[in-house]
Image (cartoon, helix red, strand yellow):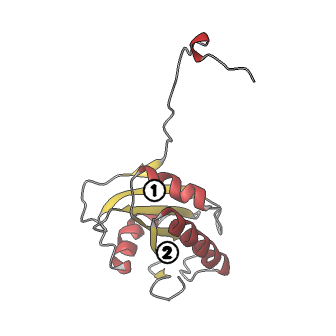
């Protein structure tokens, strides 16, 4: 077995590429009260009210459940969006989030979760448990309505 001497190799450049995320930061840490789903929904109505496509957001919270950042994870079609735990937790880890709240809109105006919404939420929650990041809720906002999966005991 031969040994390789690292001194024989010259490394010109080492670069670190940061993950570029579409994140909305806010300076008002009291902008969202994570303990009240209706307050999160009211905050998100202003962001999603005129959208014609589904958008999936993740709200990053610290140990005091104070807002750290809001990350736009994906933009979908008029009636669906594709999201995986990888996309959810990539930015959450970079934001040092202790817990997260998932939020997406239904452009149809109907805020009730589909069976796919429930299944995806359960997968994300399981992944979060492995990473030590709690999924506190998944809120779906529609036209002047919202559904908290936590309040509906779906997660």
Residue 127: x percent and y percent? 57, 66
Q: In the drawing, what numbered circle is on residue 21?
A: none
73 above or below 48?
above
Residue 68: x percent and y percent? 33, 57
Q: Residue at x 50, y 62 (%)?
A: 131
Q: Residue furthest front?
A: 1
Residue at mark 1: 92
Residue at mark 2: 138
Residue 115 appears anywhere in the view: yes
Badge nearest the viewer, 1 or 2: 1
**Circle nearer the N terminus (1, 2):** 1
Residue 151: x percent and y percent? 44, 87
Q: Residue furthest right?
A: 1
For the N terminus, the quadrant is top right
Q: Residue at x 54, y 77 (%)?
A: 109
3D distance between C-alphas at marks 1 and 2: 15 Å
Residue placed most toward the observer, 4 or 45: 4
120 above or below 151?
above
Element type at marker 1? helix
Q: Residue at x 54, y 66 (%)?
A: 130
Element type at marker 2? strand
Q: Residue at x 30, y 54 (%)?
A: 26
Q: Are marks 1 and 2 in contact (CB under 8 Å)?
A: no
92 above or below 64?
above
- Circle 1 packing at 10 Å, graded few (<14), some (14-19), many (20+), is many
What is the quadrant of residue 67 in the picture?
bottom left
What is the quadrant of residue 76 in the picture?
bottom right
81 above or below 5?
below
What is the quadrant of residue 38 in the picture?
bottom left
Residue 116: x percent and y percent? 67, 76
Residue placed most toward the observer, 67 or 17: 17
- Circle 2 packing at 10 Å, graded few (<14), some (14-19), many (20+), is many
């Amino acid at each position: 077995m031969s040994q390789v001497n690292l001194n024989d190799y010259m490394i010109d450049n080492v670069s670190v590429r940061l993950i570029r995320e579409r994140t909305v930061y806010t300076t008002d840490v009291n902008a969202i009260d994570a303990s009240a789903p209706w307050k999160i929904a009211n905050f998100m109505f202003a962001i999603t009210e005129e959208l014609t496509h589904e958008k999936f957001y993740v709200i990053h919270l610290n140990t005091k459940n104070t807002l750290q950042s809001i990350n736009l994870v994906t933009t979908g079609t008029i009636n669906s969006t594709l999201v995986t735990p990888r996309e959810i937790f990539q930015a959450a880890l970079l934001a040092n989030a202790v817990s997260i709240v998932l939020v997406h809109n239904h452009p149809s105006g109907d805020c009730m979760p589909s069976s796919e919404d429930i299944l995806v939420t359960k997968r994300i929650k399981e992944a979060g448990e492995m990473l030590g990041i709690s999924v506190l809720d998944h809120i779906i906002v529609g036209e002047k309505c919202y559904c908290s999966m936590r309040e509906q005991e779906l997660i």
